[in-house]
Image (cartoon, rainbow, N blue to C red):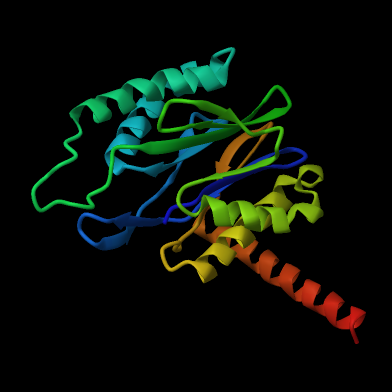
Amino acid sequence: MTVVLATVCEDGVVIGSDSQITDKGRGMTYPAEKLHPLGDTAAWGGSGARSVLTDVKRCFNEKSAAILEAPDIGRALQAQVLPILRHHYDTFIPDVPGGEGGGTPSAYVMAAGWRDGEPWIIEITPSGMIGHYADIGFHAIGSGAAMAQQAGSLLSHFRLGQRSVRFGCAAVLRVLHALDLTSASVGKPFSLCRIDAKGAHHLSDEEIEEVGEVVRKWEEAEQAVIAKLFD
C-alpha cells in the first residue's frame, strides 16, 4: 500500500509519503523513496507502476524548470506524464503465462508547490486527467489514500490552512503514523517536504525525528486535556 498526501498551510504546503513498495508479482515488499524534488520550489510523489514512475522522475528532473514556469502547471505536468503513460500502456503485455497478478502500468502522480503567494496541489490520474486540490486543502493518492483522507478529515478541526508549515509537518506525520498503525503495508521511514516562499525543503531523518517528538507532545497534550474534561 502506498500513500502520498499533501496539505495546504497558511504559509505553504506540506507533502509526505511512506516508503513501502509492494511487488505483487514477486510477493514481496521493500522500502523505496516515493517523494522527489520538482525543481527547487515544488515536490512530487507517485503511486502505481514503478517503471512508469521511474520514467516520470527522469522526465521531471529534466523538465522541472519548464513545468514550474508554465502559465498552467497542471497542463504542463499533464503534457509530460501523458506520453509516458501512453508508451507503457502500448507496450504492456497483460497475459503472461504464469505471471498472473503482476500488476498494471497505471500510475498516479501528485505534485505540490507554492507560487506567487498561492499553494497548488495537482494530480495526474492514470487516464491523464488533471485534478486541482489546493482549494480543498488536502489530498492523497495511493492505495492508502482513502484512509489518509479519513485521517485528514479527523484533523480538519485544527484548521491547517490557518497554521504554519511547521504545524503542517506534524499533522502530515501524524496521519502517516496512524496509517502505519492500521495498515501493515504502509511503512517507515516516512518522507516529508515543506514548501513555502523560500522554496522546497526535504526534511532529513533527524528533522523528521524532531517532528515526531512534536507529534508525541501533541498527543500527550490531548490526553491531558481529555483527562481534565472528564475527570
Residue 148 percent coordinates (x, y): 58, 54
Quarter occupied by the N terminus? bottom left
Image quadrant occupied by the C terminus: bottom right
Left or right: residue 148 versus residue 77 is: right
Residue extending furthest toward the left: 97
Question: Is residue 229 toward the left or the right of residue 107 in the image?
Answer: right
Outermost residue toward the top? 71
* Residue under the image location 42 percent in, 47 percent down: 34
Determine the residue positioned at 66% across, 33% down.
Answer: 198
Res. 108 in view: yes
> Which picture quadrant has residue 91?
top left
Camera-side residue: 143 or 176? 143
Image coordinates for residue 83, horizontal then vertical, percent: 33, 20
- Vertical placement of residue 118 versus 231, above or below: above
Q: Is residue 192 visible?
A: no
| Left or right of residue 66, residue 86 in this image | left
Q: Name the residue nearer the viewer: 23 or 7.
A: 23
Res 200 quadrant in image: top right
Q: Position of residue 7 (x, y in %)?
A: 66, 44
At 48% across and 26% down in the image, what residue appears?
A: 129
Q: Residue furthest bottom?
A: 231
* Residue at (50, 36) in percent of width and height: 110
- Would you say 73 lies left or right of 136 here? left
Taking depth in this image into account, of 36 and 20 the one nearest to the observer is: 20
**In the image, is residue 54 above or below residue 193?**
above
Number of disc labels: 0
